[in-house]
């Protein structure tokens, strides 16, 4: 379906084309008739002149040829019986009797005769004008091709003028059509904004009163929708917030507790059903149960710690200590947990004043994440109060960098990231110490997590 502006432009174009065709056909016949009449009048004047000159000169071929060269039209002198007496452009001896020619017949009856026809002698179309004199008929002929050429020159000038006018009309209609199209686009954009609940979207239309009316009603509609949406948001805001927090907690806890509980249940059931199990295998199953229970304990501790942070019940207990010593202890602990992994430690003494236990938790969480989500070696650096962990893992996509420190956020549900609380806890600990977590990551290349304690806590 065409747009309104295009319908307007298309109809105008069809109307102008039809008008142009009709005027062209009409003017063609009008101009042709006028031109033939003009040339016929000129030939009549020339016939009178030839008649006057014949009164002083005998009718001969030489005489009419001389007149032909002067006036540029063919001259034929015919007697009342139709015999050619003199001819300016053809051998009169080879010419047939002209008594049956329509212009000659008309001249014999009325004194003047005129016709447009094909010349059998010269094989072209002529305009003939014949005048009856005392004892002969003076006939002049003008090639119709010249008449048509002159006519086409005038006709083409007229068509060019009409074409210029039509072009201006089309240009004006195109401008009007473009203005209408712009106004309609503004209205469509405004409606799209309303559909996306953008009620303060600007709408400025002009050009016609109808567009002003439409804009006025649309703004009233927008105002009503905005008020209704505000009431709806105010009514459901608290309910959604409570529901979202509850769902996040239930989802995270159920997901993360599911695997270790399943491990404990599976191995314990096997131990119960197989009392004669070999001692080595039994010890291995018991170790699996022990590890899974420790994991549940760690999850509960992290969840409790996150809740305490969020409630604001924890305050850092600051003391002076060496960040390098804490980093060594964290690396040694995690190296035991990941014996097959390589952890490179580059450490310089950095005396800071902070809560040692909280900083140890922050370092442990960052290093644990790097070991979980990468397969190559992990590098730890401590210098000038700055702690960094760099891995060569899969990295983090740019659109997720601002989300990974949020509570319960997981990049992949299958990752074991302790309910998505690790980076949340790190961020909260650093916030309590006036610092923040710095994250640099390139997808498929690796990540670097750093933090620096406030320079006011550093002492040489």
Image (cartoon, rainbow, N blue to C red):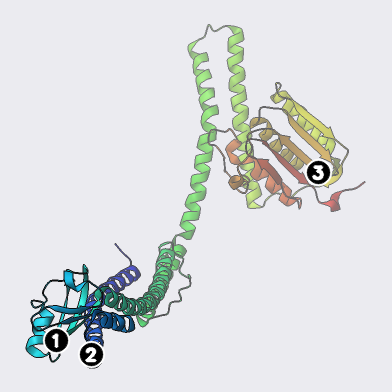
- Graded by Cα atoms within 10 Å as few (under 14), some (14 to 19) or many (20 or more), the crowding at tag 1 reads many
- Graded by Cα atoms within 10 Å as few (under 14), some (14 to 19) or many (20 or more), the crowding at tag 2 reads some
Looking at the image, is mark 1 or mark 3 earlier in the sequence? 1
Which residue bears the numbered disc 3?
386
In the rendered image, which quarter is residue 451 located in?
top right
Which residue bears the numbered disc 1?
136
Residue occupying image coordinates x 69% and y 25%: 337
Question: How far apart are the two marked residues, 2 and 1, measured between alpha carbons?
Answer: 11 Å
* 185 vs 325, nearest the viewer: 185
* 222 vs 183, nearest the viewer: 183
How far across and down, in percent of the image, does residue 67 sit? 29, 84
Do the numbered discs 3 and 2 sit on residues whose CB atoms are within 8 Å? no
In the rendered image, which quarter is residue 286 located in?
top right
How far across and down, in percent of the image, does residue 397 sit? 60, 42
Which residue bears the numbered disc 2?
54
Query: Is 335 above or below relative to 125?
Result: above
- Element class at badge 2: helix
315 lies left or right of 58: right
* 365 vs 19, nearest the viewer: 19
310 lies left or right of 121: right
């Amino acid at each position: 379906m065409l747009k309104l502006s295009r319908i307007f432009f298309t109809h105008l174009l069809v109307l102008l084309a039809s008008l142009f065709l009709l005027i062209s056909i009409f003017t063609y016949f009008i101009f042709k008739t006028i031109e033939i009449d003009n040339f016929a009048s000129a030939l009549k004047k020339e016939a009178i002149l030839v008649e006057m000159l014949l009164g002083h000169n005998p009718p001969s071929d030489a005489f009419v040829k001389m007149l032909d060269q002067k006036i540029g039209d063919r001259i034929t002198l015919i007697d009342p019986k139709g015999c050619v007496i003199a001819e300016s452009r053809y051998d009169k001896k080879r010419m047939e009797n002209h008594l049956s020619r329509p212009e000659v017949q008309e001249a014999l009856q009325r004194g003047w005769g005129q016709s447009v026809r094909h010349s059998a002698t010269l094989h072209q179309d002529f305009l003939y004008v014949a005048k009856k004199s005392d004892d002969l008929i003076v006939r002049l002929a003008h090639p119709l091709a010249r008449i048509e050429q002159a006519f086409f020159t005038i006709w083409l000038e007229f068509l060019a003028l009409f074409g210029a006018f039509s072009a201006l009309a089309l240009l004006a209609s195109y401008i009007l059509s473009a203005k209408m199209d712009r106004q309609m686009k503004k209205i469509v954009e405004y409606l799209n904004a309303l559909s996306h609940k953008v009620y303060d979207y600007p709408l400025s239309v002009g050009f016609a009163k109808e567009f002003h009316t439409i804009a006025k009603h649309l703004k009233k509609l927008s105002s009503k929708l905005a008020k209704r949406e505000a009431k709806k948001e105010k009514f459901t805001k608290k309910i959604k917030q409570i529901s979202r927090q509850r769902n996040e907690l239930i989802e995270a806890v159920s997901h993360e507790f599911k695997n270790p509980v399943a491990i404990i249940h599976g191995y314990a059931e096997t131990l119960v059903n197989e009392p004669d199990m070999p001692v080595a295998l039994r010890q291995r199953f018991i170790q699996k149960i022990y590890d899974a229970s420790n994991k549940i304990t760690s999850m509960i501790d992290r969840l409790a710690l996150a809740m305490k942070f969020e409630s604001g019940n924890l305050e850092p207990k600051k003391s002076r200590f060496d960040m390098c010593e804490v980093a060594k202890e964290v690396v040694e602990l995690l190296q035991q947990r990941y014996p097959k992994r390589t952890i490179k430690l580059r450490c310089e003494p950095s005396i800071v004043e902070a809560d040692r236990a909280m900083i140890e938790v922050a370092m442990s969480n960052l290093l644990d994440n790097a070991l979980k989500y990468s397969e190559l070696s992990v590098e730890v650096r401590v210098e000038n109060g700055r702690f960094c962990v760099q891995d060569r893992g899969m990295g983090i996509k740019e659109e997720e960098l601002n989300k990974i420190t949020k509570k319960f956020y997981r990049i992949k549900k299958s990752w074991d990231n302790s309910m998505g609380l690790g980076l949340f806890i790190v961020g909260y600990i650093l916030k309590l110490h006036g610092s923040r977590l710095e994250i640099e990551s390139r997808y498929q290349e690796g990540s670097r997590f750093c933090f620096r304690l406030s320079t006011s806590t550093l002492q040489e």
